[in-house]
Image (cartoon, helix red, strand yellow):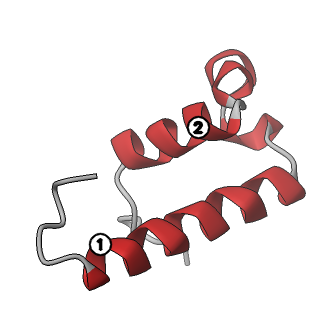
Amino acid sequence: MARKRGVMSEALKYELAQELGVDHIVRTEGWGGVTSRQCGNLITLAIQRAQRDLQSPYPDSR
């Protein structure tokens, strides 16, 4: 059974894809065109950002 909602918003996923330089793949081929390695790197970046935000008393200031 497929999930009805994701953990990350589409906006956040696209922002992370831009940081990793794979946003052009997402635009042209969709998320299915992104390799497993690139998705893993995206998740790693999301985890690092979440950990940083949890440690910061001001999560909106980057």
Give the Cα separation between the discs numbered 2 and 1. Answer: 17 Å
Looking at the image, which residue is at 34% across and 53% down?
9
User: Dots 2 and 1: beta carbons under 8 Å?
Assistant: no
In the rendered view, tell whether residue 48 sits above or below residue 60: below
- Give the number of the disc on residue 53: 1
- Under mark 2, the amino acid is Glu
Looking at the image, which residue is at 79% across and 41% down?
34
The image quarter containing residue 39 is bottom right
10 Å neighbourhood of mark 2: few (<14), some, or many (≥20)? few
Of callouts 2 and 1, the N-terminal one: 2
Secondary structure under the numbered disc 2 in the rendered image: helix
Q: Residue 10 or 21: which is nearer the viewer?
A: 21
Q: Residue 29 or 52: which is nearer the viewer?
A: 52
Callout count: 2
10 Å neighbourhood of mark 1: few (<14), some, or many (≥20)? some
Locate residue 10, reporting x and y percent. 40, 44
Query: Which residue is labeled 2 in the image?
Result: 19
Locate residue 45, reporting x and y percent. 59, 62
The image quarter containing residue 8 is bottom left
- Under mark 1, the amino acid is Asp
Q: Residue 26 or 3: which is nearer the viewer?
A: 26
Secondary structure under the numbered disc 1 in the rendered image: helix
Image position of 52 (left or right of 1): left
Locate residue 3, reporting x and y percent. 46, 72
In the rendered view, tell whether residue 54 sits above or below residue 35: below
Looking at the image, which residue is at 38% across and 66% down?
4
Looking at the image, which residue is at 65% across and 56% down?
42
Q: Quadrant of the N terminus?
A: bottom right
Query: Could one spot residue 2 in this view of the protein?
Result: no
